[in-house]
Image (cartoon, helix red, strand yellow):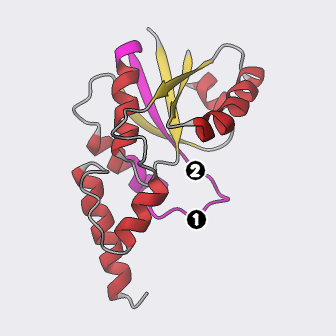
Amino acid sequence: MKRAVYPGSFDPLTNGHLDIVQKAVRLFDEVTVAVLHNPEKQPLFSVAERVALAAEALADVPGVRVDSFTGLLADYARRVQADAVVRGIRGTQDVASELPMAQMNARLNPEVTTVFFATDVHSADISSTLVRQIAKFGGDVSGLVPPNVAAALAKRFAAATEGGH
């Protein structure tokens, strides 16, 4: 069985992320979407919320599971017996930032190979940061994220508006 880990903050999960998962499940028997807990960041959604949103959005995709982790990706990949780390590439900026991480992960865990997938042309401009900004100001994110994520974003920002923020 070939296993892959697709790590990220997924704050929030976007249609671009779903595109990468769909590509990965064609090559791997099991793909774990691994939500990173990064104590240096202040996410919009908690780790538990991000895991729940991803699990709901990916419930109908065979071979996918959702988990969370903290610490080094190389250690997590070893724990779940992953053969590969999956990463999405939207453009040259992603290559510049992803390549050194892939090389360091290979140094820390030589049994795991990083596999890069080019995003679909329709997803290349989607980032979680842009989605959060659009949703914060009441913009339509329905074509950028799964329906459950769009609803969660609307609810989160409606609550913030009602709270006077």
Tag 1 residue: 42
Q: CA distance from mark 2 to mark 1?
A: 10 Å
Sort mark 1 into few (<14), some (14-19) or many (20+) by Cα contacts within 10 Å.
Answer: few
Tag 2 residue: 37
**In the rendering, at what x and y percent does residue 164 appear?**
40, 91
Classify residue 12 by image quadrant: bottom left
Residue type, label 2 = His
Classify residue 93 by image quadrant: top right
Secondary structure under badge 2?
Answer: loop
Task: Specify the segment rendered in magenta.
Answer: 26-51
Tell me if 58 is positioned left or right of 118 in this view: left
Is 102 colored magenta in this rendering?
A: no
**In the rendering, at what x and y percent does residue 31 appear?**
42, 25
Between circles 2 and 1, the one closer to the viewer is 1
Sort mark 2 into few (<14), some (14-19) or many (20+) by Cα contacts within 10 Å.
Answer: some
Secondary structure under badge 1?
Answer: loop
